[in-house]
């Protein structure tokens, strides 16, 4: 995998992935930016959320469960002093479906957190990562 990050102006940067996709990163005006894009540290949480979501959706679909939705909310706490690494990360899953057993949802999340999600496991080397979920049954 590879990525190229190019400075645009002020504190705005354009990242282009090896797969050809692009996104804008920027800082707040307090740090010399114009708030035109996502913060780089937010991208770490977004990457973790995307990685674990892919795992959980894949596991539940392979189990042939009637999955309707998967949403992940992540809250990260950072150290007060530089380097301001994440020290605690909480991942909350909102799973929507029909007749999906609670133990299967919990197992999918556990597999992602402990064996599959590279981003979660990597961030877990420097931060305490916790998980919980809610299940919404739909008709």
Image (spheres, rainbow, N blue to C red):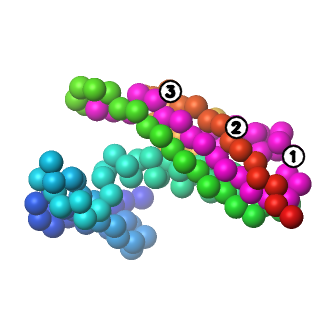
Q: Which residue is drawn at 67% across and 57% down?
A: 70
The residue carrying mark 3 is 128
Q: Find residue 104 and report its image quarter.
A: top right
Q: Which residue is drawn at 85% across and 52% down?
A: 100
Q: Which of 1 and 133 is in front in this view?
A: 133
Q: Is residue 31 above or below residue 132?
A: below
**Residue 63 in sight in this render:** no
Q: How far apart are marks 2 and 3 (CA)?
A: 15 Å
x, y percentage for residue 116? Answer: 63, 44
Q: Nearer the viewer, residue 104 or 17?
A: 104
86 in magenta: yes
SS state under label 3: strand
x, y percentage for residue 81? Answer: 24, 26
- Sequence order check: which comes first, mark 2 or mark 1? 1
Span shown in magenta:
84-113
Q: Distance between the residues labelled 3 and 1?
A: 27 Å
Q: Which residue is drawn at 53% across and 31% down?
A: 129
Q: Which of marks 3 and 1 is in front?
A: 1
The residue carrying mark 2 is 110
4 in magenta: no
User: Is residue 88 rendered to the left or right of residue 9?
Assistant: right
SS state under label 2: helix
User: Is residue 67 rendered to the left or right of residue 6?
Assistant: right
Q: What number of labels is visible?
A: 3
The residue carrying mark 1 is 101
Number of other residues with Cα within 10 Å of mark 3, as a class: few under 14, some 14 to 19, many 20 or more? some
x, y percentage for residue 31? Answer: 15, 48
- Sequence order check: which comes first, mark 3 or mark 1? 1
Number of other residues with Cα within 10 Å of mark 2, as a class: few under 14, some 14 to 19, many 20 or more? some
Q: Find residue 85 and report its image quarter.
A: top left
SS state under label 1: loop
Q: Distance between the residues labelled 2 and 1?
A: 14 Å
């Amino acid at each position: 995998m590879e990525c190229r990050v190019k400075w645009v102006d002020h504190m705005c940067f354009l990242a282009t992935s090896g797969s050809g996709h692009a996104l804008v990163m920027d800082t707040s005006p307090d740090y010399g930016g114009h708030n035109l894009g996502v913060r780089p540290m937010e991208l770490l949480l977004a990457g973790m959320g995307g990685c674990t979501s892919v795992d959980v959706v894949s596991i539940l679909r392979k189990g042939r469960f009637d999955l309707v939705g998967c949403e992940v909310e992540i809250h990260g706490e950072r150290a007060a002093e530089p380097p301001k690494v994440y020290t605690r990360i909480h991942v909350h899953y909102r799973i929507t479906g029909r007749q999906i057993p609670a133990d299967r949802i919990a197992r999918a999340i556990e597999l992602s957190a402990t064996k599959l999600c590279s981003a979660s496991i990597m961030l877990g080397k420097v931060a305490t990562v916790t998980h919980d979920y809610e299940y919404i049954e739909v008709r």
